[in-house]
């Protein structure tokens, strides 16, 4: 059976209607006020008013003591709570995850970033290539396999012959000449 949908589009909420929020279930209030369920839920939520028919499960000290000692999934199953509620509670109390999927980077792991290809670091550390790439970028390091020209290398194009520049920056004289031609930079004798 389809429920009748009441709408009062764009009508301002009255103080009386606001006082009714959270006192009776949202669906019932929506029918009574001839507003959509979504409108009632949104209004109640924006005002920070809990649901009238919400089932609240308060945390006790014994339950909180489990947080961070066991995986969230196991705690949720054992306490009959949602995984989301366990994660939120642990985070609100500032308790770290007992076995994070992405453990903190060690100094030894970070030393190779920007010098060794991301795929190799991923293989050595057991992290994903994307995780390695994100960490390298967060530290402001370039990809060692990226052979893009830097601004500093481009500025050198006007200062010396192709062979000398090539030796200084680890590129062939032909690559330097091609770059110079691309930018239409002519080397004066």
Image: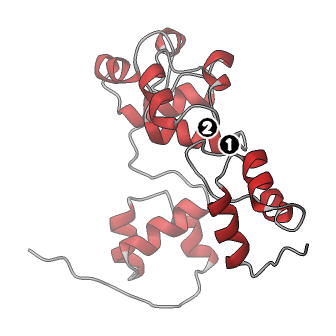
User: Residue drawn 46% across and 16% down?
Assistant: 99
Report which residue position mark 2 lands on.
135
Q: How crowded is mark 1: few (under 14 residues within 10 Å), some or many (20 or more)?
A: few
Q: Nearer the viewer, residue 10 or 34?
A: 10
Report which residue position mark 1 lands on.
138
Give the quarter of the figure containing the C terminus.
Answer: bottom right
Q: Nearer the viewer, residue 98 or 81?
A: 98
Q: Indicate the quadrant where residue 2 lies.
A: bottom left
User: Residue drawn 52% across and 34% down?
Assistant: 88
Instruction: Provide the secondary structure element on which disc 1 rests.
Output: helix
How is the structure coloured here? secondary structure
User: Residue drawn 33% across and 66% down?
Assistant: 27
User: Residue drawn 45% across and 52% down?
Assistant: 51
Q: Which of 98 and 22 is in front in this view?
A: 98
Where is residue 8? Give x, y as percent. Answer: 43, 89
Give the quarter of the figure containing the N terminus.
Answer: bottom left
């Amino acid at each position: 059976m389809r429920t009748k949908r009441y709408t009062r589009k764009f009508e301002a909420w009255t103080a009386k209607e606001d006082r009714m929020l959270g006192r009776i279930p949202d669906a019932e209030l929506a029918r009574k006020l001839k507003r959509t369920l979504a409108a009632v839920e949104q209004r109640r939520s924006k005002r920070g008013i809990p649901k009238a028919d919400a089932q609240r499960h308060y945390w006790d000290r014994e339950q909180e003591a489990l947080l961070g000692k066991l995986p969230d999934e196991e705690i949720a199953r054992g306490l009959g709570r949602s995984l989301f509620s366990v994660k939120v509670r642990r985070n609100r109390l500032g308790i770290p995850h007992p076995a994070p999927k992405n453990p903190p980077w060690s100094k030894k792991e970070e030393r190779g970033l920007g010098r060794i290809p991301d795929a190799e670091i991923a293989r050595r550390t057991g992290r994903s290539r994307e995780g390695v790439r994100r960490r390298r970028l967060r530290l402001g390091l370039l990809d060692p396999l990226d052979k893009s020209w830097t601004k500093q290398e481009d500025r050198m194009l006007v200062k010396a012959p192709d062979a000398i520049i090539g030796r200084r920056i680890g590129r062939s004289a032909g690559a330097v000449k091609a770059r110079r031609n691309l930018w239409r930079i002519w080397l004066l004798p």
